[in-house]
Image: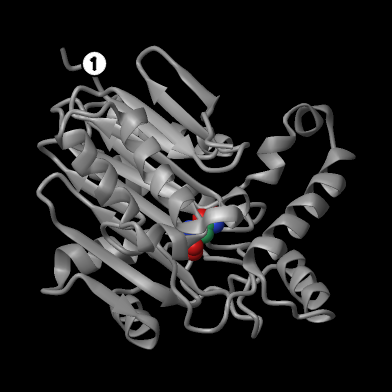
């Protein structure tokens, strides 16, 4: 009944990240190694404005990144508000494997990373700095509005670049936080999540992505889930944990994700239409699915049979 190894990521451009993860999974490697390798791809990609290098800064112009990992033994690690480190997912894994703790924040997270031999890297690209200076002209702190304005702008600029991007505007619009979950040949599950958070957030703000149970959750008896979107709303419903518990009680991955979406919609009343929350999940059999609040969420999947991006059903 088990359908073989599989990796699933938020957002269609992460087909590229899946490729790196598949390198590990297709050789019989461990799901944890696969998701770590996969998430490192957008972390180093300057064109992904929501993850690692090239991520948009906070309102003070500082890029702060959040990441977490969780493995088949239920172990987990995370870093929040980390600066100057290219691969936060690797630091999160070391928190899990080499400390008695689960979460490190800010200065302490940086100190820990440096003590493990990570080097400082400036994560603020000239493009991200330009976008921040543009934002400073109005300094309106409205994460939903800011994301939408920015997305529109990126679409216009990139449309001139080439046919591929013109054909797939959602790839440009939604170049976003990576949540990656995988099941390996042994049927073991792991996941990782990495983000630079909401653009122009207040200093010190942390969203769902590095919070175990919100941005990511893995239970090797049941399945794994991860997400993207307005972190505040995802934290309020313990997004990823909710989904895994729904699957435990018999829901399919898609049904479980839809229930998380329903709770966000319920919490937000009339405003729900503008609150993106995108969820993806895998169960123990290797079945997968997703659901989102707003349109234009996508997921990237790779297994023995397919390597592609899929549109995800949405509430609105
Ligand atoms: C956060 N969930 O920090 C992240 C943001 C995100 O695409 O998904 N951006 O709230």
Question: At x 19% / y 64%, what residue is drawn?
Answer: 96
For the N terminus, the quadrant is top left
Q: Which quarter of the figure has residue 9?
A: top left
**Left or right of 46 in this view: 211:** left
Can I make out residue 62 in this image? yes
Q: Nearer the viewer, residue 250 or 90?
A: 250
Is 19 above or below relative to 10? above
For mark 1, give the secondary structure.
loop
Is 211 above or below relative to 220? below
Residue at the spot of label 1: 3
Q: Which quarter of the figure has residue 288?
A: top left
Q: Nearer the viewer, residue 121 or 314?
A: 314
Question: At x 53% / y 25%, what residue is drawn?
Answer: 310
Question: Residue 77, position in %: x, y?
Answer: 24, 64
**Left or right of 310 in this view: 33:** left
Question: At x 36% / y 55%, what residue is drawn?
Answer: 215
**Left or right of 73 in this view: 109:** right
Question: Residue 161, position in %: x, y?
Answer: 85, 39
């Amino acid at each position: 009944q088990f359908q073989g190894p599989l990796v699933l990521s938020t957002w269609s451009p992460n087909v590229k990240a899946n490729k790196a993860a598949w390198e590990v999974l297709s050789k019989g490697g461990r799901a944890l190694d696969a998701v770590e390798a996969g998430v490192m791809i957008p972390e180093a990609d300057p064109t992904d404005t929501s993850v690692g290098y090239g991520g948009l800064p906070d309102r003070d112009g500082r890029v702060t990144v959040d990441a977490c990992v969780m493995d088949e033994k239920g172990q987990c690690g995370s870093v929040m508000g980390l600066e100057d480190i290219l691969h936060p997912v690797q630091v999160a894994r070391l928190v899990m494997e080499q400390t008695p703790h689960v979460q490190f924040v800010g200065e302490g997270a940086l100190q820990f990373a440096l003590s493990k031999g990570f080097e400082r890297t400036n994560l603020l690209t000239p493009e991200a700095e330009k976008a921040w200076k543009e934002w400073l002209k109005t300094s309106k702190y409205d994460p939903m509005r800011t994301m939408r304005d920015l997305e529109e702008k990126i679409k216009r600029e990139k449309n001139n670049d080439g046919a591929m991007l013109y054909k797939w505007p959602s790839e440009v619009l939604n170049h976003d936080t990576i949540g990656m979950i995988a099941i390996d040949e042994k049927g073991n599950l792991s996941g990782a999540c990495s983000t630079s958070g909401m653009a122009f957030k207040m200093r010190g703000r942390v969203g769902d992505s590095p919070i175990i149970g919100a941005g990511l959750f893995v239970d090797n008896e049941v399945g794994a889930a991860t997400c993207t979107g307005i972190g505040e709303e995802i934290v309020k419903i313990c997004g990823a944990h909710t989904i895994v518990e729904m699957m435990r009680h018999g829901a399919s991955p898609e049904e479980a994700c839809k229930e998380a979406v329903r709770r966000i919609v319920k919490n937000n009343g009339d405003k729900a239409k503008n609150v993106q929350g995108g969820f993806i999940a895998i169960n123990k059999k290797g079945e997968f699915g997703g659901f989102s609040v707003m349109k234009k969420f996508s997921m990237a999947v790779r297994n023995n049979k397919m390597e592609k991006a899929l549109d995800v059903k949405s509430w609105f």
